[in-house]
């Protein structure tokens, strides 16, 4: 893999952001964007526990999906308060995925401002909270609706590995899924198995470590793998693709591709998974031939 560092700025004008990052589909970290928000100082474990500690949440472990794994199904359930106690006490490789805390505590919406000064199209009904204990992993994937994301880290540090959507076959994307078959866990300590995944050598991406207050702009469709170096949480603000084709791709992924995959996993999981692996191998061979 060839990895570059993500550009980092304190602040940025709309013109520069649009020209150098949005239109060119390049990730960026903005250091000062969230530091003007009340949330920067206000949001912490104790505050969230006091607001929504009794809410039931689904939690996810680090095990990668297989032929039988349903989409976005939690591995266990607990209350948000008990989960916070668990991740505060030490390493805990459990994370909370797409928890809409704002449905339960709408006053939190007053603690931040949408970055409308940089771009338009934000889906303001659905800000999302992502929470993880130290050691938890969000495996390599792209967001199914292909939205643009402003991802702000609160508390703790998180390592992020990023690739443009076009690198999908070098990343060994599973057909009819948004996931890679490759396990990138702790890639920075031990490289992925290039003997098993030779096309991965030719993938080009970015990496960055997010700290408290950092906002990462991820262009629509970007692949990302995240590892919580410390227990923490982040908020994602989503904006729809600006083109009709981009919006239609998101609709297909949500209601066409995902439905087909769900049905096939129920009806013929092993045969379906075997077909996927065959397609992955064919794509690998095509890439390797092109690189000769």
Image (cartoon, rainbow, N blue to C red):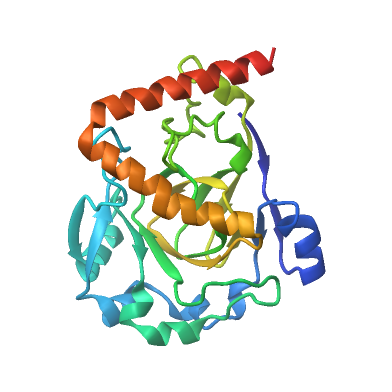
Q: Which residue is at a point 75% across and 63% down the rendered structure image?
A: 17
Residue 152 in the image: state x and y as whole percent: 53, 65
Compared to 3, does 38 lie above or below?
below
Horizontal side of residue 75 vs 246, given as left or right: left
Whole-percent x, y for residue 291 in the image: 68, 17
Q: Residue at x 55, y 15 (%)?
A: 285
In the depicted view, which residue is nearer to us: 290 or 12? 290
The quarter of the rendered structure image containing the N terminus is top right
Please state the horizontal and vertical placement of residue 8, each as a whole percent of the image: 70, 57
The number of numbered badges drawn on the structure is 0
- In the depicted view, which residue is nearer to us: 210 or 129? 129
Report the residue at 49% width, 79% height from top: 39
Depth check: 215 or 289 in front? 289
Residue 136 seen in this snapshot: no
Residue positioned 26% across, 56% down in the render: 59
Quadrant placement of the C terminus: top right
Return the residue nearer the eye: 41 or 208: 208
**Residue 23 vs residue 99: left or right?**
right
The quarter of the picture where residue 182 lies is top left
Is 267 on the left-hand or right-hand side of 28? left
Compared with residue 11, is residue 283 higher up or lower down, i.e. above or below?
A: above
- The picture places residue 104, in percent across and down from the top left corner, at 30, 80
Residue 10 drawn above or below residue 110 = above
Q: Is residue 91 visible?
A: yes
């Amino acid at each position: 893999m060839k990895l570059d560092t993500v550009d980092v700025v304190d602040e940025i004008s709309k013109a520069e952001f649009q020209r150098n990052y949005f239109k060119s589909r390049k990730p960026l970290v903005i250091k000062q964007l969230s530091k003007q928000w009340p949330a920067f100082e206000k949001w912490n474990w104790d505050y969230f526990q006091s607001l929504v500690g009794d809410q039931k949440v689904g939690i996810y472990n680090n095990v990668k999906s297989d032929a039988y794994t349903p989409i976005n199904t939690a591995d266990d359930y607990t209350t948000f308060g008990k989960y916070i106690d668990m991740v505060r006490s030490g390493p805990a490789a459990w994370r909370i995925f797409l928890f809409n805390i704002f449905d339960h505590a709408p006053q939190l919406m007053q603690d931040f401002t949408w970055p409308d000064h940089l771009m338009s199209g934000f889906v303001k009904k659905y800000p999302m909270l992502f929470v993880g204990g130290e050691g938890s992993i969000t495996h390599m994937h792209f967001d199914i609706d292909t939205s643009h994301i402003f991802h702000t880290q609160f508390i703790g540090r998180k390592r992020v590995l990023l690739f443009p959507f076009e690198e999908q076959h070098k990343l060994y994307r599973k057909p009819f899924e948004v996931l890679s078959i490759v396990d990138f866990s702790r890639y920075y300590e031990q490289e992925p198995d290039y003997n098993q995944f030779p096309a991965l050598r030719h993938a080009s991406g970015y990496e960055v470590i997010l700290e408290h207050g950092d906002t990462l702009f991820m262009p629509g469709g970007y692949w990302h793998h995240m590892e919580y170096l410390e227990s923490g949480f982040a908020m994602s603000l989503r904006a729809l693709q600006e083109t009709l084709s981009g919006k239609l791709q998101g609709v297909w992924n949500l209601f066409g591709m995902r439905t087909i995959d769900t049905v096939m996993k129920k009806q013929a999981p092993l045969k379906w998974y075997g077909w996927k692996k065959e397609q992955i191998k064919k794509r690998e061979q095509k890439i390797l031939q092109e690189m000769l």
